[in-house]
Image (spheres, rainbow, N blue to C red):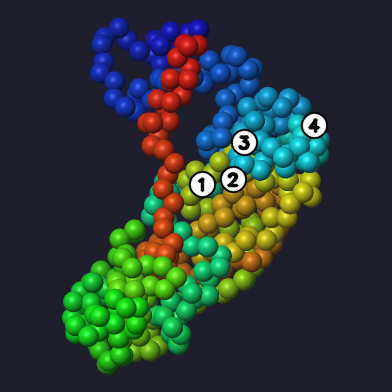
Amino acid sequence: MKTLKEIYGHTTEPKKLGTKELRKIIEGLIREEAEEISGYASVNTGTNIADLDGTEAYRQLTSGDENAPLIQAMMNATGWASGAIEGAGGAQGIKAWAESVGEGALASRISKVGTALPSQGLPKKDMPALEGEDAPEVKDALSPGGKYNVDIEATYAGDQASVDAWMDTLSDEDKAKLAAGEEPEIKQESLVKEEKFPAPGTIKGGGPNPVGQALAFLVKGKHDGDQADDSINVQVGGSIANSAMIPTQSNILAGKSLLFAFLQGTGNTDLSDMGGAFVTSAGEILDGHHRWSGAYIGTGGGLTHSNVHIVDGTADSLLPALTAIGNAIGRTQKESKKNADDLVMERWRRMAGIL
C-alpha cells in the first residue's frame, strides 16, 4: 500500500489536519483498499452519479458479477430492489441490458446526468416535501377563488407581508377563529412589503385541517382587498419531455439511478409516469430526481413523462412558497439521513481491521 506522502504529497513538515483534509485521507484509504480487494472502482449506495465514471460503470454492469460494487449498490438501493433485479434476470440480465445499450451510449448518458447536476443544491430540509396528491391544494393556495389563497404579491393583507405580523393586527375574535380552524371574516385591506413566507419547518398548526398560523398563511391572500393579484398557475397532471427537465439536487444516487434505468430498459417498469412529481415551468425538478435520471439513462432522454404537476415560475422564486404551503398542509421536510462526517467515521471504523 502507498504511503500518505506518496498518495497525497505530504511533506515531512508537521501540518494540522482539518476535518476536510482528514475526510479526504480516510475516504482515499478506504477507496484504495476496497479497489485492491475487489478489482473494481469503489461504489456504494451513497455514491453520487456525478462521481461515477461511465466506462467503469459499463465494465461493472457487463461483468455478470453480482458482487461488483455498482451491482450491489443497485441491489441495495431500496428495500424492493434485490427482488426486482432478480425478477428481471439478475446480474446476467443487467449484463445483457448494458451490452444492448453499448458502452459509448451508456457512458455518455451517465456522464450527461452527472454534469447536469448543480454544484450546490438545497438540502432536503429546505425543499418542499409535497406529495402528488397535494396538487389540488397547492393549486388552490396559489390561485384565487377557492378555499385558500397565499398572499404572494405586493398588495398585502393588513399592510403586512409577514403572516405573523398580520395575525398580530387581528382582533381577539379573529385570532380565536384561526385557532379553531375557522377563517376570519374577509375585510378590505391594502399593502406594505415584509417577509412573506415563514422559514422551512417553522409553521405551527399545519395539517390536513390547518389551524392558527398555518391557516392564516393559507388564507391571507383572500384578505388583501385584491382578489386577482395572488395567482400562480399550476397545471395538475401535465406532461413534460424527459430531455427538457433540469435537476435541482446536487446529489443523485448512482445505484438507484442505474436500478431504475435497468428496469425501464428491460420493460420491467414504466418511468413515463412521474407519480405526481412537481416541476417548474422552466423544467426544474422539485422531486422525482431518480425517476428522471433513471429514465434518461434508460432511454437517452427519449421519454415523455405524464402525471407531472407543473408550477409556473422558476425554482428560486417558487421554493419558499411551495415549502411553506407544504408545511401548512402538514408536509414536513425530509432530513438528511446522516451527517457526512458521521458517514466517513463509520466507514473508517468498518475498515479499521483491514487498515
> Label 4 crowding class (10 Å Cα cut-off): few <14, some 14-19, many 20+?
some
> Circle 4 sits on which residue?
92
Which tag, 3 or 1, sits closer to the chain's start?
Answer: 3
Circle on res. 117: 1
Front label number (1 vs 4): 4
Q: Quadrant of residue 227?
A: bottom left
What amino acid is at disc 3?
A: Asn
| Whether residue 241 can be seen here | no
Image height of 123 relative to 98, above or below: below
Marks 3 and 4 sit apart, C-alpha to C-alpha, by 17 Å
What amino acid is at disc 1?
A: Leu
Marks 3 and 1 sit apart, C-alpha to C-alpha, by 23 Å
Residues at marks 3 and 1 touching, judged by CB atoms closer than 8 Å: no
Residues at marks 2 and 4 touching, judged by CB atoms closer than 8 Å: no
> Circle 2 sits on which residue?
113
Residues at marks 3 and 4 touching, judged by CB atoms closer than 8 Å: no
Which tag, 3 or 4, sits closer to the chain's start?
Answer: 3
Marks 1 and 4 sit apart, C-alpha to C-alpha, by 30 Å
Image height of 169 relative to 248, above or below: below
Identify the residue at horizontal 76%, vertical 37% (top origin).
86
Using residue 325 as the reference point, say whether residue 297 is left or right of it. right
> Circle 3 sits on which residue?
76
Marks 3 and 2 sit apart, C-alpha to C-alpha, by 21 Å
Residues at marks 1 and 4 touching, judged by CB atoms closer than 8 Å: no
Front label number (3 vs 4): 3
Residues at marks 1 and 2 touching, judged by CB atoms closer than 8 Å: yes
